[in-house]
Image: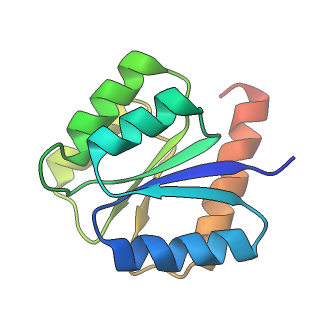
Amino acid sequence: MSVKILLIDDETDYSETVGFWLMANGYQVRAVSSGIDGLKAIKDEVPDIVFLDFLMPGMDGIETLREIRKINTELPVIMVSAYAAEEKMKEAEKMCISGIFLKEAELSEVAKMISETLRNMKKGV
């Protein structure tokens, strides 16, 4: 069974690049461009992992994460950022994120984060 990943990011070029790479590596990917659309997608079909951008217009990543936690406290969320303020990172960590992925990092790092997140899910961490 393929791992379902939801990408929530307003930068469609970035989502398309990461989404293409993930699909080429055997993952099922759904990409949306706003927090509101991300919440709808989660209600439609719960993904295995969410990649959530910190900075988005309208509902930002922290607000979206708060709403995700109201729906599902266990859903693994990896925050994505070109840069994020230290206080925003700490706030996200308090809401039990699975990690933070920097946009300039190599895409191979995405695979490592996914593997680690799935391992932690199996352990019940």
Using residue 86 as the reference point, say whether residue 7 is left or right of it.
right
* Residue 62 quadrant: top left
Residue 105 position in % (x across, y down) = 46, 79
* Residue 45 quadrant: top right
Q: Is residue 90 visible?
A: no
Using residue 38 as the reference point, say whether residue 85 is left or right of it.
left
Residue drawn at x 63%, y 77% as measured from the top left: 21
* Residue 49 quadrant: top right
Relative to residue 8, is residue 105 depicted above or below?
below
Residue drawn at x 19%, y 56% as measured from the top left: 56
Q: Between 25 and 95, which is closer to the camera in this rendering?
A: 25
Residue drawn at x 72%, y 44% as measured from the top left: 118
Residue farthest to the right, as pictured: 1
Quadrant in which the C terminus is drawn: top right
Residue drawn at x 48%, y 20% as measured from the top left: 73
Residue 50 position in % (x across, y down) = 51, 46
Coloring basis for residues? rainbow
Labels in figure, total: 0
Residue 16 position in % (x across, y down) = 48, 75
Residue 5 position in % (x across, y down) = 60, 51
Relative to residue 81, is residue 99 depicted above or below?
above
Using residue 107 as the reference point, say whether residue 91 is left or right of it.
left
Q: Can residue 34 be seen in this view?
A: yes
